[in-house]
Image (cartoon, rainbow, N blue to C red):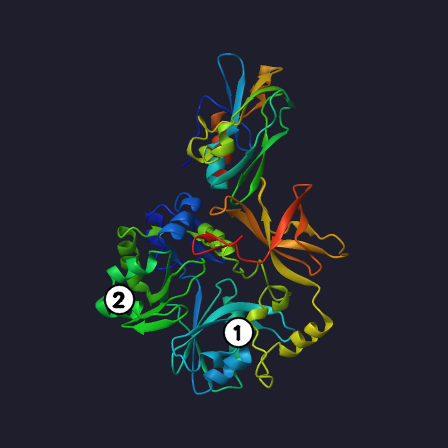
Amino acid sequence: MSEIRTELKYLASHEWARLEEDGTVTIGITDHAQDSLGDVVYVETPEIGSAVNAGEEAGVVESVKAASDIYSLVSGEVIAVNEALEDAPETVNESPYDDGWFFKVKPADPSELDNALDADAYREIAEADD
Amino acid sequence: MGNKTPLYDLHREMHGKIVDFGGWDMPLNYGSQIDEHHRVRRGAGMFDVSHMTIVDVTGSDARAFLRRLLANDVEKLQSSPGKALYSAMLNDSGGVIDDLIVYHMGGWYRTVVNCATREKDLAWMRRQAQAFDVAIDERPQLAMIAVQGPQAIDKVKALVSAAKAAAVAGLKVFHAAEVEDWFIARTGYTGEDGLEIILPGQAAAGFWRELALAGVAPCGLAARDTLRLEAGMNLYGNDMDESVSPLAANMGWTLAWQPQQRDFIGRAALQAEKQRGATHKLVGLVLEGRGVLRAHQKVIVAGSPHSGEVTSGTFSPTLGFSIALARVPVEVGDTCLVEMRSKQVAVKVVRPGFVRHGQSLL
């Protein structure tokens, strides 16, 4: 059974978002997503300073098995990307919710996160997927 | 629920991630497929390949039958009992029904064919056998474990009976021996040295446990695929099928044209194709930059009106970048373009075969 954290928000396409204390939003892929993908070998993150839109493609994760687009949960400016994934993409498999985060956004409208799924709603989707 | 091998419960116990593969519930990986891949290249790993179909051919016409059935010639094995041969089994129009290994065991032959093609293979073999005094016997009660890697043979020798260890010690590459009730072959699908061991189903779980305790890593189908692709070995259904000629699947080396009077099935069609000249061939592709080549991506060759297609693509754990097999127009040069996620990316064209015995061939 994959881990689903109650404090996070989710998309049905298996991204998670965390609203940080400073008002920024961190985005990554779920434990279920990394388990389905298998060994991650490349991560393509958006560029710092670029704009991302809620529900739109912001990057790509590639495993040995498959390539998958990464969607943002909020609109705004990308203020940080996880550069460690360049040399250690396996971090996404090992620590999907912590060290394996993808990028951070300064959200234009933090209330966009209210449209995302909560943990219970996401759990139903992840379980139906198994 | 699919078919289960005698090792199914053990795969679950060892945390294998089970997936459907050609109607069989098989382990995809036991954690990280990349770790499993490296274990085979650097030490020893084991694969449950009991889903593969073992078919024994016996009877006074066994040799004559196989010389008609197979595009390679079992006559090559005649003077060396125990020797194995890789061959295509073709239809009348020269398409590949399946690829297989045939072992010559003295008075009889053992073949190992793919699991997804089991029914059509058996039907075809039985149909062709009608004109011969042969018996075609499937052996579903047998299990098969491939132990592969530079340490594989030593690990096995240390665990088995003295008679089996002696047989393994005397086994030449691409040869098999029957000893006690095991069939032990020095063959594989990884590009490493190793063994493929066919044994009674009820003995499989005990042997698998002993191998695991001896440090042989359980490996799933995912690692099996990256290993065979690094080794440049075809996968039936990806790299060739009934619509593809062996000449367009890098299998020309398996076609035995001599002696000319041997009329194997598909021969006339292949000869006509050779005279016309092939339009496509199977090559290796290398992408040293980011991204992973995937099956069915389109290949564009400068100066050719035809396009090509990636037939198998993956990330190579040994090399650290992506490799592929692709069927491309014969005009291809040293580079070509692959359409990847709406971009055209330049890749190198190489001979199929990327890694052998742990070393890069590039």
B193 shown above or below B16: below
For the point 40% across and 43% down, which residue is it?
A: B31
Q: Secondary structure at mark 1?
A: helix
The crowding category of the residue bearing disc 1, from other C-alpha atoms within 10 Å (few below 14, some 14 to 19, many at least 20), is few
Question: Does label 2 or label 1 sit earlier along the sequence?
Answer: 1
Q: Looking at the image, can residue B348 be seen?
A: yes
Left or right of B182? Residue B314 is: right
Instruction: Judge by depth and name the residue closer to the eye, B176 or B333.
Output: B333
Instruction: Judge by depth and name the residue closer to the eye, B173 or B229.
Output: B173
Q: On what subunit does the disc labeled 1 rest?
A: B
B232 shown above or below B292: below
Residue type marked 1? Ala
Left or right of B248? Residue B140 is: left
Q: Position of residue B66 (x, y in %)?
A: 50, 80
Q: On what subunit does the disc labeled 2 rest?
A: B
For the point 39% across and 56% down, which residue is it?
A: B47
Q: Which mark is residue B165?
A: 2
Q: Position of residue A114 (x, y in %)?
A: 56, 19
Residue type marked 2? Ala
Q: CA distance from mark 2 to mark 1?
A: 37 Å
Q: Position of residue B262 (x, y in %)?
A: 57, 84
Q: Which residue is mark 1?
A: B123
Pair 2/1: label in front: 2
Left or right of B40? Residue B304 is: right
